Image (cartoon, coloured by chain):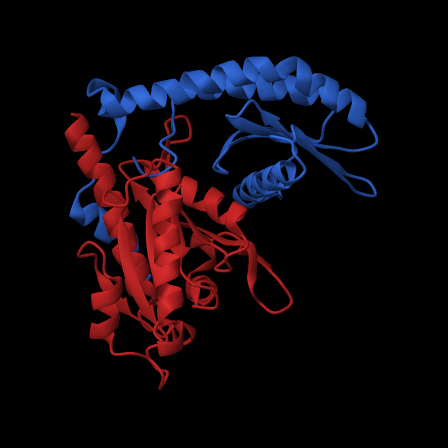
Amino acid sequence: MPFINYAQREITCKLVYYGPGLGGKTTNLQWIYEQTNADARGKMVSLATESDRTLFFDLLPLTLGTIHGFKVRFQLYTVPGQIFYEASRKLIVKGADGVAFVADSQEARYEANLESLRVLHANLEEHGLSFAEMPYVLQLNKRDLPTALPAAVLTRALQCKGEPVFEAVAPRGIGVFETLKGLIKLSLSRLRTETTVAR
Amino acid sequence: MAGSGLVLHEDDFLNLSRLVDVLMRQANARFVTLIDRNGQPIAWSGMMMQLDRTALASLAAGNVAATETLARMVGESAFCALYHEGERDHLLIASVGDVAILLIAFDERSSLGLVRLRVRQIGPSVEQLMRRVLARSQADEANASARLGVPEITDEDIDNLFGDRF
């Protein structure tokens, strides 16, 4: 459930871009940052190494508007793909209200996608979060590369629970906003479902 | 349940803000922020006009998480505080039990000793209140009537959020 602050009249959703190293998670956030009006976005925080690999995380705050007087804010995070940054990855997954799995379509990264997916399940489980209940979308990135596997093959291997699948070429923005919009819809719909159920 | 699951009611916000104000005054700090363990800013006090609270809170929580792994590597369960020393401004990031984080920025008008003392003095009250907030949040999840203040979100509301942006 998102963070609901009655005093500030704010709902904050933490959305996490998860996936194998160098799969394009940061590129997704960079595109969103560049294409979003300055009044809707906060500063993008990027903690990258010299080789452009994400060390801790990237963070992009977005404020899209209000719903019934509640300001709706999103915090978009990426996790470091590298296996040795387990501590920061766990922290980010811990408070997630939605996850977009950014898969690398290249054949050589097939196993890395599966391994990353396996670790995602483990990270969620560690925090007592249910993958089945987590708002979740799958993005097949790098569709423009000649080494990309067919989307149907990747979907068969990586789709876990009938989640929406988006094909993307993140550096050119293809599929980037579609992925974000899909994830936001699922995350906010979940809040509605929870509210309705609670009533 | 996914997410932080934190529901902050107005009375809790005011009580926490009051404690954060007291800490800021007593520690002679520049500003103080109370952050939940997931990196959400909960309450703040002091000169923070130019600062991005969201980024500050996320980075502090990330710092604490990474340091906990370091602590385990050297045989400690956790480090209770982190200190960053600058030329003029310094930061103390202190864990409040296992429920929250206090970030205190101070300069030459205060000292590390004073800030640590004040954090130790006020920490238990902050922890007690944060535990109450967490317990209330869990109860809100389960309790039908408590969630009545949450807006009824329709598909149209969600579409309107995007507008022409995307």
| Hue used for the chain lettered A | red
Q: Colour of chain B?
A: blue
In the rendered view, tell whether residue A40 sits above or below residue B65.
below
Left or right: where does residue B151 sit relative to residue B114?
A: left
Q: Quadrant of residue B102?
A: top right
B82 vs B139: above or below: below
User: Where A193 falls versus B155 (above or below)?
Assistant: above
How many callouts does the rendering have? 0
The residue most toward the front is B75
| Residue nearest the viewer, comparing B34 with B95 | B95
* Left or right of B131, for residue B28: right
Image quadrant in which the C terminus of chain A is located:
top left
B51 relative position to A141: left or right? right
Above or below residue A142? Residue B91 is above
Identify the residue at horizontal 61%, vertical 37% (top origin). B72
Percent x, y of residue B149: 26, 25
**B140, A38: nearer the viewer:** B140
* Residue B25 placement (x, y as % from top left): 70, 19
User: How far across and down, in percent of the image, does residue B9 sit?
Assistant: 38, 21
| In-front residue for pair A6/B97 | B97
Query: Is residue A5 something one can see in this rendering?
Result: yes
The residue shown at (22%, 53%) is B159
The residue depicted at 35 percent of the width and 77 percent of the height is: A107
Tell me the quarter of the image containing the N terminus of chain A: top left
Q: Is residue B110 visible?
A: no
In the rendering, at what x and y percent does residue B66 appear? 59, 43
